[in-house]
């Protein structure tokens, strides 16, 4: 990593020079890993609450007297530090409340009503704050918020997030999903806040949650939480040092974001040049550029995802596997499709190859042909059925959209319906049925998957369409074409819907999806080649994820490896 982007060596000298021996080197190691900035912040907080972020004077003559230790903190403390439970430090410790009527009582003007979405580790965010009237506020007198209070989210996905209410903050109240921590000595608030957002406290939050359906931190557990307590003057120095180091991390992060944006632009440009190349020479140049810079272009999960999309486009353009002359051409497959549909008394819809190519936005090899999706289907596209779900187990399972959103069928996503579906109903899925989502967010509308499983196990919902294809064309090939960005763009461009609703595509749009047709053997060869390339992408993603996971593990290991200064002792308990 470049020194002016990912290290602290070029940072402000007065900040880094004051770090204990070895800490700067440890931070630089962490910053040199993927996601190193976030891991560095965790490392800084961990060192701060354990008394290892500042240089420490071990001269016994100048040492401060030890504060009382009345709670068991699970790590050694500096000689002058004490410890206490959260409850012993507070005059108020409890959850907020929600007014009767919930959102219905919110006003366009009035008293600030803080909710969990307003509480962030870097402070209160009030862009979407709710307001209540003065009477409601007075009725909820027990959960008034005061300047200097520490707020802590105690339920939901944001559990553990915390903020200090700033000095001079106007009257406010707080919801039941947020706890108020009102300290006897408000001078402690900044250090207590550091403790709460530190890995030490956050791990304990995760360890003592209650509730099954939703995460929750009980007030009893919160009262019992043991906190380390430095002398007040040292607390101020620690908070100041953390703020300085976090500011440096913010600067480094901003540089990394700019570097990441440039990297994303380079990756997009390289892949776009490849997928849009029309001549073999242009393709060779684009491939050489990607090959020469592969590690730099695909070093992030977003880049690998873009690589996957590009591979599918290359596949449907015929660039992933060579054409073989004696395999014939796509018109042979088209003739077999015509014969099969005719045998099933299905009218053949003529295809204008120029219009099909325009709808797809790509050119294909001369030996290929064009059809529409309806030219490949012996059944469908036909919408499913969505009766009301029930909370108890029945004999009928109906898929939910999530079962096919990923592009692969997942039978774990279904709901029970209390309705008997005839055994001969076309609503029942059979192995090899092709499912297409007719409604979802714009990103996922048109998502498709192949049902793999026993017959009459699931029915499919109204928000999906089902097709059953002719064996004259390879099912996996058609699914691959539908999954390619070219076809997804075709669906998105034809989706309709009112503002705020999920976009929808109709049967005509799905039936008209353009499908390029190579010879059957070539279809299967391309599909197999794409599977192999997707496995390469799997390996790339796994390596990136392991590196990211390693950053946090490295930070934790470094904290444990730094030698304890002289005089550190275990707390009482």
Image: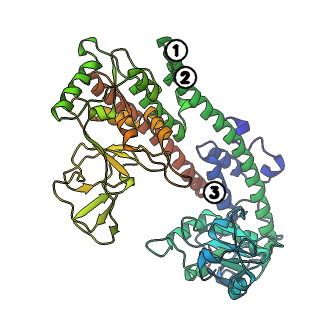
**Which residue was labeled with disc 3?**
42
**Residue beneath disc 1:** 282
Q: Secondary structure at mark 1?
A: helix
Q: Toward which corner of the image does residue 420 lie, by quadrant? A: bottom left
Q: Quadrant of the C terminus?
A: bottom right
Neighbour class for label 1 at 10 Å: few (<14), some, many (≥20)?
some
Residue at mark 2: 273
Q: Verify CB contact (< 8 Å) between mark 1 and mark 2.
A: yes
Q: Above or below — where is 526 with respect to 394?
A: above
Q: Earlier in the sequence, mark 1 or mark 3?
A: 3
Q: Residue at x 44, y 20 (%)?
A: 363
Taking 430 as reference, is 515 above or below it? above
Name the foreground residue: 106 vs 213. Answer: 106
Q: Residues within 10 Å of mark 3 (few under 14, many from 20)?
A: some
Q: Report, in whole angstroms, how far the alpha carbon at label 1 lies from the one at label 2.
A: 8 Å
- Badge 2, how many Cα within 10 Å: few under 14, some, many 20+? some
Q: Which mark is residue 550?
A: none
């Amino acid at each position: 990593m470049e020194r002016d982007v990912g290290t602290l060596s070029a940072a402000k000298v007065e900040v880094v020079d004051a770090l204990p021996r070895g800490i700067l080197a440890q931070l630089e190691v962490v910053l040199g890993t993927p996601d190193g900035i976030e891991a560095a912040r965790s490392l800084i907080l961990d060192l701060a609450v354990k008394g290892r972020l500042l240089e420490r004077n071990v001269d016994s003559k100048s040492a401060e007297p030890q504060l009382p230790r009345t709670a068991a903190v699970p790590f050694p403390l500096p000689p002058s530090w004490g410890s206490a439970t959260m409850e012993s430090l507070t005059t108020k410790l409890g959850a907020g409340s929600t007014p009767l009527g919930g959102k219905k009582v919110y006003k366009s003007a009035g008293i600030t009503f803080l909710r969990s979405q307003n509480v962030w580790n870097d402070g209160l965010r009030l862009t979407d704050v709710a307001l209540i009237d003065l009477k409601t506020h007075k009725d909820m007198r027990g959960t008034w918020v005061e300047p200097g209070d520490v707020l802590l989210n105690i339920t939901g996905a944001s559990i553990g997030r915390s903020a200090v209410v700033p000095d001079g903050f106007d009257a406010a109240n707080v919801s039941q999903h947020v706890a108020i921590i009102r300290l006897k000595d408000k001078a402690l608030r900044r250090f207590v806040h550091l403790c709460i957002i530190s890995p030490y406290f956050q791990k304990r939050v995760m360890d003592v949650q209650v509730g099954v359906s939703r995460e929750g931190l009980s007030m009893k557990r919160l009262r019992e939480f043991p906190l380390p307590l430095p002398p007040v003057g040292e607390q101020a120095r620690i908070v100041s040092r953390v703020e300085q180091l976090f500011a440096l991390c913010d600067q480094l992060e901003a540089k990394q974001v700019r570097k990441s944006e440039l990297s994303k632009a380079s990756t997009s440009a390289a892949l776009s040049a490849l997928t849009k190349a029309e001549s073999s020479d242009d393709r060779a140049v684009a491939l050489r550029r990607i090959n020469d810079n592969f590690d730099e272009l695909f070093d992030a999960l977003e880049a690998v995802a873009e690589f996957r999309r590009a591979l599918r486009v290359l596949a449907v353009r015929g660039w992933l596997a060579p054409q073989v002359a004696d395999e014939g051409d796509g018109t042979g497959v088209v003739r077999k499709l015509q014969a099969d549909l005719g045998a099933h008394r299905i009218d053949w819809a003529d295809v204008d190859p120029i219009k099909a190519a325009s709808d797809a936005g790509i050119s294909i090899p001369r030996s290929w042909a064009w059809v529409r999706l309806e030219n490949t289907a012996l059944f469908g596209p036909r919408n499913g059925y969505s009766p009301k779900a029930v909370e108890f187990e029945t004999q009928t399972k109906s898929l939910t959209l999530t079962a096919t959103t990923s592009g692969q069928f997942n039978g774990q996503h279904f709901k029970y319906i209390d309705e008997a579906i005839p055994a001969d109903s076309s609503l029942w899925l059979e192995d090899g049925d092709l499912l297409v989502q007719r409604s979802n967010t714009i990103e996922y509308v048109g998502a498709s998957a192949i049902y793999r499983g026993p017959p009459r196990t699931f029915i499919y919902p109204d928000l999906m369409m089902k097709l059953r294809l002719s064996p004259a064309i390879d099912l996996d090939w058609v699914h691959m074409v539908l999954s390619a960005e070219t076809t997804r763009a075709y669906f998105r461009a034809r989706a309709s819907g009112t503002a705020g609703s999920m976009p929808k595509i109709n049967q005509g749009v799905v039936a008209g999806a353009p499908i390029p047709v190579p010879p059957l053997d070539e279809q299967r060869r391309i599909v197999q080649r794409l599977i192999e390339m997707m496995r390469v992408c799997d390996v790339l993603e796994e390596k990136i994820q392991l590196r990211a996971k390693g950053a946090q593990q490295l930070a934790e290991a470094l904290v444990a490896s730094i030698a304890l200064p002289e005089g550190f002792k275990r707390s009482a308990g």
